[in-house]
Image: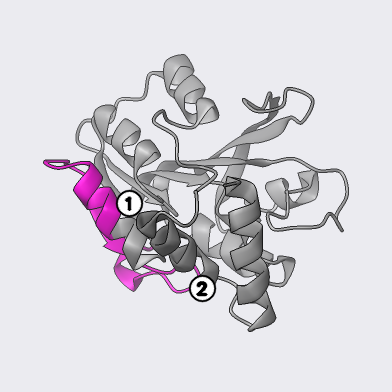
Amino acid sequence: MNSERDADRLAAASLAEGDPTGWFDRLYHEAEQGTAEIPWDRPTPTPQLAAWAAETRPAGAGRRALVVGCGLGRDAEFVAAQGYATTAFDISATAVRVARDRHPGSLVRYVVADLLDPPESWLRRFDLVVESNTVQALPRALRDRATAATAALVAPGGTLLVLAAKTDAPDAAGPPWPLTRAEIESFARDGLDVVSIEDFPSRDDPAKPRWRAVFTAR
């Protein structure tokens, strides 16, 4: 079984049907049945997120965090461990259910939601928003909408952390569709300013750097 091939197979079928996000739940469902593997299902948090926390030592107590496209919860649990009151969402109901089962007694609030149509009550609410590899999984036709929706979740004075694969080719094939420098910079909108945009080595292939970008909301 090849996890990347499983994701590619289901994504291709979903995109052919005109459903750019339906393959996520199909992948999680097949994984639960033992007929597919999830490439990003790992026991540790995303390395760029862990490194950011080690460098900045965020004071999460009394503050709210949101994890975008949380999958099975590894990053959400890590964020909650930093003291944040953490909400984590995914468009896949299967992923959310498995995340709850995988982390019994968790303080994370796992919910089903769509980044392209988030609850209005979430707008400008969160002191920390973590977007890890979710926008890059959406076709480029949806990229600007997803970027704007992510930026709108950050509360005044809050931080947005964006983690994504890097490319210099705007027509790179996908999914995922890695982000160009211009696409990373486009998160700086609606009152968000760039704090830093850095290359970060990939855990799987050091020759393929990734983006780690930090923004703050006015």
What residue is at 68 percent from the left and 23 percent from the top? Answer: 201
Query: Which mark lies nearer to you, 2 or 1?
Result: 2
Q: In the displayed structure, would residue 152 be above or below residue 180?
A: below
Residue 218, visible in the rendered structure: no
Residue 51, percent from left and from top: 50, 20
Q: How is the image coloured?
A: one colour
Extreme residue in the left direction: 105
Instruction: Say few, some or many: other residues with alpha carbon within 10 Å of mark 1 (under 14 / 14 to 19 / 20 or more).
Output: many
Q: Secondary structure at mark 2?
A: helix
Check the image and name the residue furthest to the top.
55
Q: Which mark is residue 22?
A: 2
Q: Amino acid at mark 2?
A: Gly
The residue sitting at 39% across, 63% down in the picture is 29
Q: Is residue 43 visible?
A: yes
* Picture quadrant of residue 190: bottom right
Magenta stretch: give its range.
97-125
Q: Earlier in the sequence, mark 2 or mark 1?
A: 2
Magenta residue check for 120? yes
Name the residue type under label 1: Ala
Residue 206 falls left or right of residue 115: right
**Residue depicted at 69% across the width and 47% down the height:** 184
Label 2, label 1: how far apart the Cα atoms are: 19 Å
21 up-or-down from 196: above or below: below
Classify residue 164 as left or right of residue 106: right
- For residue 69, which quarter of the picture? bottom left
Q: Is residue 90 magenta?
A: no
Which residue shows up at 78% across the image and 44% down it? 181
Residue 19: assigned label:
none
Which disc number belongs to residue 88? 1
